[in-house]
Image (spheres, rainbow, N blue to C red):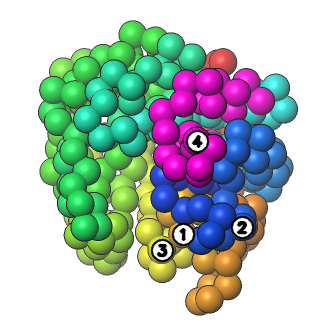
Amino acid sequence: MDKLIITVAPNGPVATKEHTPHVAVTADEVIEQGIACWEAGASILHYHARDKDQKASLDYDYFGRVLEGLRKHTTLIVQISTGWGLDDREGRIRAVDLRPDMMSLNVGSVNFGPGAYVNRAADAEYWAGKMLEFGVRPEIECFDASHVETGIRLWKMGLIEDPPFFDFVLGVPNAISYTPRNLQMMLDLLPAGARWSCIGIARAQLPVTTLGIVMGGNCRVGIEDNIYYSRGVLATNVQLVERTVRLAKELQREIASPEEARQLLGIRNS
């Protein structure tokens, strides 16, 4: 198996300090926690912007400050989220001209809790084209099996370079649930040579992470997806990375450094 690429997502668009004091809200907190997670074994950091009221935003300056800070103090692969902003097609991709290493690419709509998370086909093509133009590697977010197929279509159109990198998200309420069979089903759809990672939401994080390690994929952990270490016990982002490293070692998977992850994913040097 290839070495394991660990992504950490220290904030996301939902959790606030009222949910957990360990979520990274300010740009400085994302940088500080990013340094600690990099030292613990993470190779990729995925982050969202927040405003002064802790709400999710598309603050261009916030994205830029975090990117600059992480590049100054770490060798992390920096991935900016485009996963917020509802119908703001331009706002969601605006930070592409900062030329982060990666950005998330949401290719399909899905029921997300009580609401709808809308990602139109034409918008996905536009976002993929902008990432290609600026040399930013996309991570194809898959909340359902149809999103895998849409990602493959964009790849076949030439909007995504080799190797395409898919991220399976399991456990979002009203989207695809976590079962080993569901993970295997999504994996079976991938074209030869594709890279993949997996995310387990809430209580699914630990079993999804473990299966990803065993099955030869990669994984994402962090407070965006799960605020608990165990039932009723709040986690820090560093603890979740450290646990993943321990699991990988017990299961005899070596951990990829950021430099090795760049080679595996075809990411150009920053």
Q: Residue at x 49, y 59 (%)?
A: 14
| Residue 68 in magenta stretch | yes
The reply to whether discs 3 and 1 touch (Cβ–Cβ < 8 Å) is yes
Q: What type is the residue that disc 1 sits on?
A: Asn
Q: What type is the residue that disc 3 sits on?
A: Ala
Q: State the residue position of label 4.
A: 51
Estimate the spatial distance between the alpha carbons at disc 1 and disc 4, rounded to whole Å.
21 Å
Residue 202: assigned label:
3
Q: Is mark 3 on a helix, strand or loop?
A: helix
Q: Which residue is drawn at 54% across and 75% down?
A: 206
Mark 3 / mark 4, whichever is N-terminal: 4
Residue 226: assigned label:
1
Quadrant of the snapshot with the N terminus:
bottom right
Q: Give the range drawn in magenta.
A: 44-69
Estimate the spatial distance between the alpha carbons at disc 2 and disc 4, rounded to whole Å.
17 Å
Estimate the spatial distance between the alpha carbons at disc 3 and disc 1, rounded to whole Å.
4 Å
Mark 2 / mark 3, whichever is N-terminal: 2
Mark 1 / mark 4, whichever is N-terminal: 4
